[in-house]
Amino acid sequence: MSDERVVKSARHTELLELLDAFGTFGETEKGGIARLAASPADGHVRDFLCDWFRERDFRVLVDEVGNIFGVLDLMKGPAEKNFFCGSHLDSQPEAGKFDGALGVACACIAALCLQESVKTEGLEPSFRYFVVCCWTGEEGARFQPSLVGSSVYSGAKTAAETLAIKDSDETSLAVALDAIGYRGKDTIPKADQYLELHIEQGTELERNKTPIALVTNCWGAKKIRLKFKGVPDHTGPTPMQDRRNALLAASHGIVEVEVIANKTKATLYSSVGRIEVQPNSPNTIAEHVQMWIEFRSPDEAALEAAEKDLLKALDGIERETGCTAHISSTETRSVVTFDKTAIATIEAGFKAASIPFLHLKTIAGHDAVRLQEVCPSTLLFAPSKDGITHSPEEFTADEDVCAGFDAMLDALSNLIIGPVSEQYSGRQSQ
């Protein structure tokens, strides 16, 4: 076995061990994880990650919304230049072990490989520091909206408004971060370039037996929080014609969201993934119902039309049910195109190294979407078995993890020795 294969095998082993270690925090009986943002399990995996950084001479920084940055000095390159790479470690309530964690684990091991290449192979980087990122609250499962930490870093949201967000138990993000010790005060360097590896959450790579995909763009989204108000009353003696049932109104709303998506000629996905009912008693007519609506599309005009159609539908629901409807918040995420220069650089490297790849789009949002607002950003996908995600059944085989890592390392190597753009039109980070 060649020295190169020995090194690669050792790094693969280290990668798989780190990924397995992440999977022990918040592990469930079904074999998945429950690691909601700023929960005790999230705190424990954060502690583990920070210890891993410190043992390998990374400088650990934590910002005010809990984003963690492991900064590794490559000892060469312009002192002010920083290459960011990572993902997230929070999860859905009953999730798998690869969503987010794969990107963090691969970034950690890639950092060591790049440092070694600078020392022993004469790699001349255009960046002095390689920064591994673990973003807070990417999933949006406990604190909405999603992409919490990267939104603050990119300037899309302020730290103050983000820390004030509350979960379903009325616990604010600030309080939750304080409880696990990750409401930091560090000043974070500016990202000059970003790359993220994530599982595909689809089946294109698996079906094409391809190890890696370059993501060209991300669909836009409308995330709407809608509240219906009715009148609480007894479900027994109250005459049907006198009832003002907020849950009935919400049911009409759920159907309308589906109708809007199906009737449009554009490509439009929709969902209502969560509802809250008050007083939520079998013998009381619902007074309040809150629901979380999502529209996603590659066409921003279709998203605007969907919102207008929803408003029209609400007028009819109010008349039919006697309840009132109120949109309490709307988040609009524009269609994002990832950095074309970085994609071209990575493509050339893949072709030179005979690494097969696909071009894909992403419907789901990722932290790379927010980072594209402040620096050139790249999103890569590794295979995901049967496309299953947000489930304990989520799985990526060891050989696919390692092949995806190798492709990611090739991409990083080519980006890191390339010229750094002195100008970028996106918003400046903190």
Image (cartoon, rainbow, N blue to C red):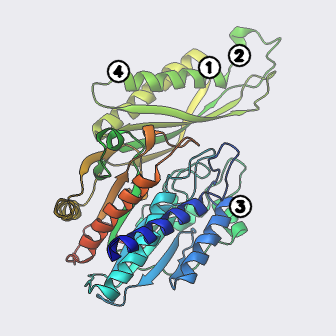
Query: Which numbered circle lies on residue 368?
Result: none
| Extreme residue toward the front, this view | 1
Horizontal and vertical percent position of residue 277: 69, 32
Say whether residue 232 is left or right of residue 352: right
Horizontal and vertical percent position of residue 253: 53, 25
Q: Which residue is mark 4?
A: 263
Q: Nearer the viewer, mark 4 or mark 1?
A: 4
**Which of marks 3 and 2 precedes in the sequence?**
3
**Which of marks 1 and 2 precedes in the sequence?**
2
Query: Which numbered circle lies on residue 40?
Result: 3
Q: Which residue is mark 2?
A: 243
Note whether 10 is above or below 323 in the view shown.
below
Q: Pointer 2 and pointer 1: residues touching (CB < 8 Å)?
A: yes
Q: Secondary structure at mark 3?
A: helix
Q: Secondary structure at mark 2?
A: loop
Q: Secondary structure at mark 1?
A: loop
Q: Nearer the viewer, mark 3 or mark 1?
A: 3
Callout 2 amino acid = Arg
Q: Which residue is mark 1?
A: 322
